[in-house]
Image (cartoon, rainbow, N blue to C red):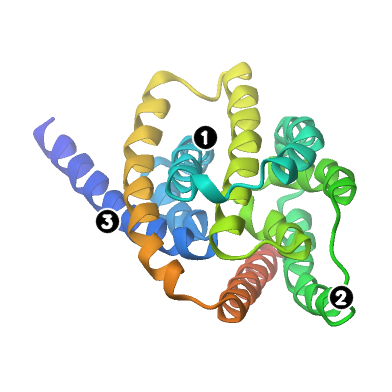
Amino acid sequence: MPGIQEAHLVNLAFILVVGLIAGTLSGIVGFGSSIMLMPVLVTVFGPIQAVPIMAIAAIMANFSRILAWRREVDWRACAAYSATAIPGAAMGAGTLLILPPRLIECSLGLFFIMMIPARRWFAAHGLKIRLWHLALVGLPVGFMTGIVVSTGPISAPVFLAYGLVKGAFLATEAASSLAVYVSKVVVFRTFGALPWEIIVEGLITGSSLMGGAFLAKRFVIKLDPERFRLLMEAMMLISGSAMLWAAAKGAP
C-alpha cells in the first residue's frame, strides 16, 4: 500500500535525524544514543524488535568511535575487561526475558546514581582500578549489559575509575562495548530474534549514529578533562533517574 510505504519512509527519516543527534551526543560522552533512540524505535517497530535493532546500531556506533579515536584505544584495558564481560553479556542476554523488568530498572538506576559519589571517592583518595580489577568486574557488568539495551552507563564508571578520559575513554569503552554487543547479537540470532529485516533496519539506524560519532570529535577535543568528567556524571544521573522513573511508572 502506498500510504503504508510513505509512512514507513517518514518514520525512517525521523529515526535517521534522531540517530544523528543521538550519535553526536554519545560520541561526546561515550553513551546516550539508546536513551534517545529506544523510545522512537519502540514506537515505530515495537519493543520486541527495537532491542535487536538497537544492538546492531550500537555495534556500528561503537565501531565508528573506535575509528575516530583509533590511536588512543587502551587495548590492554579493553582485553582485560572483555575477557570476562563477553561471556557475562551472553548470559545476560539469555536471561533477558525471564527477569522482572521493574527490578532490573530499579537496580540499575540506583547503580548509575551511586557510581557518581563512588567515582569521586576513588578520585579523592587517589585510587584507581587496575587491569585485574577490570577483569574482575567484567563478568557482573557484562551480565548487566546483556540484560539492558545500553552498556555505556554501566561500563563508563569502570573505565573512568581506571583513569581514562576524553578520546582514550571513548575509544576504549567503545572497543569493549563492541565486543559485548557482538555477543548479544549472536545470542539474539541464535534464538531467532534477528531476522534479516531486523538486520537491515539496524544497519539503517546505525548509519546515522556513525555520522554523529565523527561530528562529535571536534567537540570532545575542546573539552578539558574535568568538564568531561562532570558531563559524564550528569549523563549517569540522567540515566539513573530515567531508570528509576520507568520502574516507578510501571509499578502497579
- Label number found at residue 17: 3
Label whose residue precedes the other's in the sequence (2 or 1): 1
The three-letter amino acid code for the residue at tag 3 is Val
Kindly identify the residue that appears in the image at 79 percent across and 65 percent down: 111
- Residue 36 visible in the snapshot: yes
In the structure shown, which secondary structural element does the residue marked by tag 2 occupy?
A: loop
236 above or below 42?
below
- Label number found at residue 52: 1
Give the Cα distance between marks 1 and 3. Answer: 20 Å
The three-letter amino acid code for the residue at tag 1 is Pro
Residue 146: percent from the left, percent from the top? 70, 40
The three-letter amino acid code for the residue at tag 2 is Gly
Observer-side mark, 1 or 3, equals 3
Left or right, residue 132 beside residue 163: right
Give the Cα distance between marks 2 and 1. Answer: 40 Å
Residue 251: percent from the left, percent from the top? 71, 65
Kindly identify the residue that appears in the image at 37 percent across and 46 percent down: 210
Label whose residue precedes the other's in the sequence (3 or 2): 3
- Residue 149 visible in the snapshot: no
173 above or below 48?
below
175 above or below 246?
above
Left or right, residue 155 beside residue 234: right
In the structure shown, which secondary structural element does the residue marked by tag 1 occupy?
A: helix
- Label number found at residue 126: 2
